[in-house]
Amino acid sequence: MSDASSDLDITEFISRVVHDGSNYRMDAMEGLYTGDMTILYPDENGSITRASRSDVFGEFAARGRNGDSPLSTEYRILHIERQGDLATALLYRRMSDEAAPFLYELRLQYRAQWQVCGETVTPWPDPEVAGAFLPPRQNG
């Protein structure tokens, strides 16, 4: 277990992921993600949707081709946990002033360099219920 300040290589990698992705730099993104990367996120019904690398890259490429403005690069690394050649990073991420913030869990693998092998994206926690993943104790 570690923190962001002791994992400079991972923090620099995450900065590249955010900046290259936000600017639709598809050539750069190719090397930042494993070939089998997927993104998991809840849909409006609470079911989990899986987006493949090709789906995600297709969306980013279309935005770039269509001349969409770059996404915001606003992010904050909340936690990094490294276990050998695997790591998990939790990020606060907001992609525009019009978009809600989200909590990103990046699953990373070291293969000659760090690469994203998966992401889970969930709405940023409601401060009223944040930290309440367990119900209240029944007996004091």
Image (cartoon, rainbow, N blue to C red):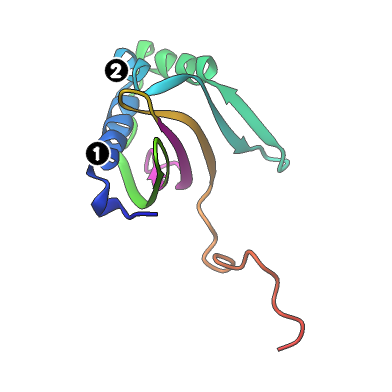
Residue at the extreme right of the image, as rendered: 138
Q: Is residue 68 visible?
A: yes
Image coordinates for residue 77, horizontal then vertical, percent: 34, 49
Task: Judge left or right: residue 55 versus residue 31.
Answer: right
Q: Is residue 39 above or below residue 60?
A: below
Image coordinates for residue 8, horizontal then vertical, percent: 23, 44
- The answer to whether residue 95 is magenta is yes
Q: What predominant SS class does the magenta segment belong to? A: strand
Pick the residue in front: 75 or 140. 140
Q: Amino acid at mark 2?
A: Ala
Task: Judge left or right: residue 115 versus residue 50.
Answer: left
Q: Is residue 4 above or below residue 41?
A: below
Q: CA distance from mark 2 to mark 1?
A: 17 Å
Q: Which residue is mark 2?
A: 28
Q: Which residue is mark 1?
A: 9
**Range drawn in magenta:** 90-109
Looking at the image, do the residues carrying marks 2 and 1 touch, with CB atoms under 8 Å apart?
no
- The answer to whether residue 108 is magenta is yes
- Residue at image coords 59%, 66%: 129
- Residue at image coords 25%, 52%: 6
- Residue at image coords 55%, 65%: 130
Which image quadrant for residue 30? top left
Which image quadrant for residue 62? top left
